[in-house]
Image (spheres, rainbow, N blue to C red):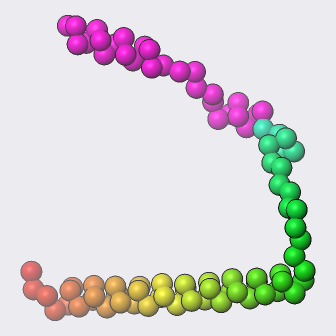
Amino acid sequence: MSSIAAMITTLKNNKRKRVSTFKKMKDFKEGKNIQVSFDKSATPHQLKNIREKLQKENKQILKRNIIVLIFIMILLIYMIGFVKF
C-alpha cells in the first residue's frame, strides 16, 4: 500500500498548469512575437550567386536521392523475384 500512496503523492506533486493551444493562439500577436532584422544586405550579384549555388546543391541532392531510390527498388525486385523463402 505504501508504494501506491507514494505513487499518488508523486503524481500530485508533478502536476503542472498546462496552457491550452487555443489560449496560445488567442494570445498570439504576430508583430510582438516575430522580430527579424538583418544588419547586412547582399548585392543583387551576391544574391544571384547564392541562388545558383543553392540550385546546384539541390540538384546534386536530388540526383543522389534518385540513385539511392533506384538501387533500393532494384534490390527489392531482386529479393522478391529471385530469392526463395
- Looking at this view, name the residue that lies furthest to the left: 85
Compared with residue 18, is residue 66 higher up or lower down, i.e. above or below?
A: below
Residue 9 % position (x, y):
36, 11
Magenta stretch secondary structure, dominant: helix
Residue 34 shown left or right of residue 58 in the figure: right
Q: Identify the residue at image location x=34%, y=13%.
A: 8
Residue 45 shown left or right of residue 16 in the figure: right
Q: Identify the residue at image location x=10%, y=86%.
A: 84
Which quadrant does the N terminus fall into? Answer: top left
- Toward the viewer: 7 or 24? 7
The boundaries of the magenta stretch are 1-27
User: Is 25 included in the stretch rendered in magenta?
Assistant: yes
Tell me where residue 22 sits by quadrant.
Answer: top right
Residue 19 % position (x, y):
63, 28
Residue 46 shown left or right of residue 24 in the figure: right
- Toward the viewer: 46 or 3? 46
Residue 32 % position (x, y):
85, 41
Q: Identify the residue at image location x=70%, y=30%.
A: 23
Compared with residue 40, is residue 44 higher up or lower down, i.e. above or below?
A: below
Tell me where residue 28 sits by quadrant.
Answer: top right
